Amino acid sequence: MTGATFDARPLTDPVDMQAVRAFGREQRANRSTGATASTVIVIVVFALLAVTVIPLVFIPMVLGVISGDLGFGIVGLLPFLLIGAVFIVVVVILIVNLRNGRIQAYRLSRFAAANGMEFVGRIDDPPLPGMIFQNGHSRHADLALRGRQPRFVEFGNYQYTTGSGKNSTTHSWGYIAVKLDVPLPNIVLDALGNNALGSNLPASFSKDQRLSLEGDFDRYFTLYCPAGYERDALYLFTPDIMARFIDHAAQLDVEIVDDWMFLYMQRPVSTLDPATWAWLFGTVGALLTKFDQWARWRDDHLPPAAAPAAVGPVAPASALPFAPPVGMLAPPPGVAPQGRRLRRGIPWITIIAFALIAGLWILPQLFGGMALFFR
């Protein structure tokens, strides 16, 4: 992502289906999209159609011909024709979805190339430290795009599943991952504009880690930082950076963890909508210009690094401007253990649900005991 131009034409321009098919073959060979799995599904459906519906259609016809009662054959054929029609509709829908998925991936690959990025496609179990990447199972990102200039940025749609069987739930997120210059304390900005009944984040954090910032920032975000890192959060979120987040990312949840910054939203990031991409490019571009000052942050909770051995003549410390103490340097890049992760809390919805369940179990027992007592 060079930031020099923004070309959205590949998202909407007509496509050459021959080029789409060639792209699909290339992606299946690289196993970077879900096309292989979709193809298997279509093959399985066709196989079921061949071994079930087709024989069931011909059996009543053959019986009607043998018995000489064609009416019996036609009437008996109707339910099976209906089943066959349902199967055909299902197959057509699968084929159309597969075709549209290939066209979408092809358009995004052209869009990535036109804007200085690369199309990655599917990533199974992304090795990223963000909170959404640590939950559930069957974790994968899809339609992922990456830019490497002026720094590494990845856009993708992400899914994971919690529970199993009938009790399973699939969670979908759009994310932007930005590589930072140095590790920073674990800081979360919970955007208030996208919350409904409480936070929409997949994790909750202890309330004593909330930090109120100046100005209108608290009207847009709830900021969490590890205890003891309040001064560091104020250093990182200067008024100009807070203004950038309010102006460009007020509908996005933000997480800083290790040397990554993540922007989350509960709808696809990688899409064929030019307006969405224009907004996302503008948001990332506005934030990137402020990350250089974050690179200068150092964790005072870490012990200072020892000064390297002197080589050649060295000026006395008193002659050096802003000289560190003799034998000592500033803390090395990194984060002390207590600042690497926020402490998790218990969601209030979970507390209410537990209280309701306990109440529904205890109250009948209580009233039952009182009824026996007064009988």
Image (spheres, rainbow, N blue to C red):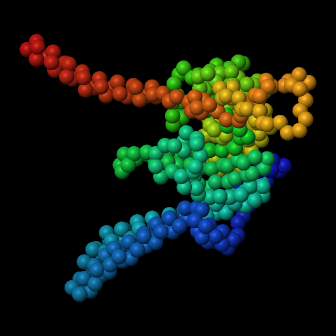
Q: Is residue 355 visible?
A: yes
Where does residue 340 sit, x and y in percent of width and height? Answer: 59, 33
Q: Residue at x 54, y 44 (%)?
A: 133
Residue 27 locus on image (x, y percent): 62, 67
- Residue 281 vs residue 190: left or right? right
Which image quarter: residue 365? Answer: top left
Percent across and percent down for residue 238 are 75, 25
Which residue is outermost to the front? 312
Left or right placement of residue 3 versus residue 135 in this view: right
Q: Residue furthest top?
A: 374
Count all numbered tags in the image, as a single digit.
Answer: 0
Choose between 361 and 75: the one closer to the eye: 361
Q: Nearer the viewer, residue 230 or 215?
A: 230
* Residue located at (77% from left, 33% from top): 307
Relative vertical location of residue 209 with respect to residue 262 in this rendering, above or below: above
Residue at 70% of width from left, 18% of height from top?
Answer: 214
In this view, 4 is above or below 362? below
Instruction: Classify residue 236 by image quadrant.
Output: top right
- Location of residue 195 (image quadrant): top right
Q: Is residue 244 visible?
A: no
* Residue that sits furthest to the left in the current view: 375
Residue at 51% of width from left, 24% of height from top? 206
Q: Position of residue 342 (x, y in %)?
A: 56, 30
Query: Which of 173/185 is in front?
Result: 185
